[in-house]
Image (cartoon, coloured by chain):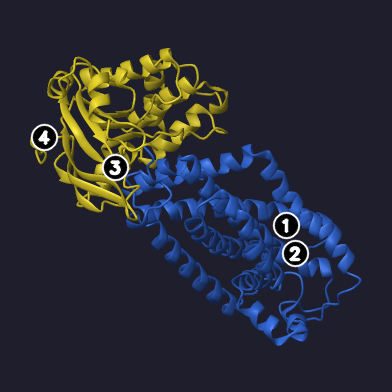
Amino acid sequence: MNNASPAAAIAFCEVSHRYGRQPALDGISFAVAPGQFAVVLGPNGAGKTTLFLLPARLLPLQAGEVRIFGTSLDADPRGALGRIGFVFQEPTLDLDLTVGENLRYHAGLHGIGRRQANLRIDSELAACGLGDESGRRVRQLSAGQRRRIEIVRALLHRPPLLLLDEPTAGLDVASRAALLARARALAAEEGCAVLWTTHLFDEVDATDLVILLNRGRIAARGPLAEINAAAGTASLAESFSRLTSDRRAP
Amino acid sequence: MSGALWARAFAGIAVREGLRFVRQRGRFFSALVRPLVWLAIFAAGFRTVVEIAPAPPYASPISYEEYVVPGLLAMILLFNGMQAALSMVYDREMGSMKVLLTSPLPRGFLLIARLSAASLVGLAQAAAFLAIAWVWGVRPPPVGLIMVMPAVMLGGLMLGALGLLLSSLIRQLENFAAVMNFVVFPMFFASSALYPLARLRQAGALLGTVAVLNPFTQAVELIRFALYAQVSVAALAAVIAALLAFLAAALWFYRPARARGFGGGG
């Protein structure tokens, strides 16, 4: 895949990052096409969250380039943020506010008018089976419901690119499956490019683009079958284990 | 983005600040009770000890309660500014700051919008306290009650900008105790909130100088003069200068190239 292709929803080109002297990412290059579901898979400390925070501009880009739909993040950071929906690793909903108030706050931050925001909120909540929860305080909801609302929030400004950082962390099996199905449907049915980070290899599907991250470097990249073939193993679990075996103990 | 979109973003931020203030009942209650305790207990006790000589903006001798009300208004703003800073650090630790900072609006606008929204919350608290003080018998001229509102807003913005600056420098919530010890209490006590500047100068030349240089004193004096329908140009200039300095420093520390506190672990 051509990393600089203007067709890519998001392209990382030779991106490196360090915290002080500690390297976190080293020469990362890959691209995700519109409608593609890409999984960044790696153990804890591999650099997944750092990779995620760079296009969010929550960390400065130290080396390399991030392109959003062909435009450099540095050239048009605000335009880029308007085209990306984020689901962060930690819960970011305001617990004291209702679901509707949280979602209207986000809509306001993206300049969406109240009437249009309410229409989108109602339709998105209904689409993920939370149509009756708009007036409930977030504190009263389960972890799985909160996560689904964070996806609703990320979609309110209709972004063509969705970034999710370990969104299934701490969820039960049913909630994980529902969340994954929703994200896959967004890619397959609505053409949304999805970049999903995880350390759980059972979240990877045969058709996904897999980026295996280890100690800040890409250990393998491609469809599941290619990675397994390159590693000479029959399953992703084995490939994962073989390719990340040089990981330092925490 | 057009002005309407920016206005919607500001409205979103302001509504959230207002809702959070009202929902957090402990904060709401203590914001009103704290200055009332000072007025009802401290000022009542001090009335017999401290004699306030008539000096501008007061045309005639006044009671200590009357003297201390502008200082208590500024205290509301100081605590509100520090509460806003605490919320910023909390939001950064908990992650909800990321929602604000990933909006496609300029970061400076987002931070100023949040500062303004918090200052509006401070203004509402100050208005509520003035109503209580009125019942208590502290009755400034009606025109002063109108003139004091922009002064309170400006003072609130300045102290909120100081809070914003502190929130950009403080990494952890635990460090906020240090802010109370080294910022809030010295600013409050080394100011003209509780005793006239002339008295502070009598106590010591250094203390008098510190009090004059203290931006909190300038906010207190701006409010004091406005409450009696006068404008202290010196205090107004000092408060605006401090506001611009704190805001510029806060925006500098919050710029994306110096992003901190969001470091990845995975």
Q: Chain of mark 2?
A: B
Q: Nearer the viewer, residue B185 or B10?
A: B185
Gap between marks 2 and 4, in whole Å?
A: 64 Å
Cβ–Cβ below 8 Å for labels 1 and 4? Answer: no
Chain corresponding to blue in the figure = B
Q: Residue placed farthest to the top in the image?
A: A174
Read off the residue under disc 2: B69
Q: Nearer the viewer, residue B223 or B95?
A: B95
Sequence-wise first label, 2 or 1: 2
> In the drawing, does residue A158 fall left or right of residue B189?
left
Q: Which mark is residue B130?
A: 1
Read off the residue under disc 4: A7
Q: Amino acid at mark 2?
A: Val
Q: Chain of mark 4?
A: A
Q: Nearer the viewer, mark 2 or mark 3?
A: 3
Q: Amino acid at mark 1?
A: Leu
Q: Residues at marks 2 and 3, common chain?
A: no
Q: Residues at marks 1 and 4, common chain?
A: no
Q: Nearer the viewer, mark 2 or mark 1?
A: 2
Res B134 visible: no
Q: Secondary structure at mark 4?
A: loop
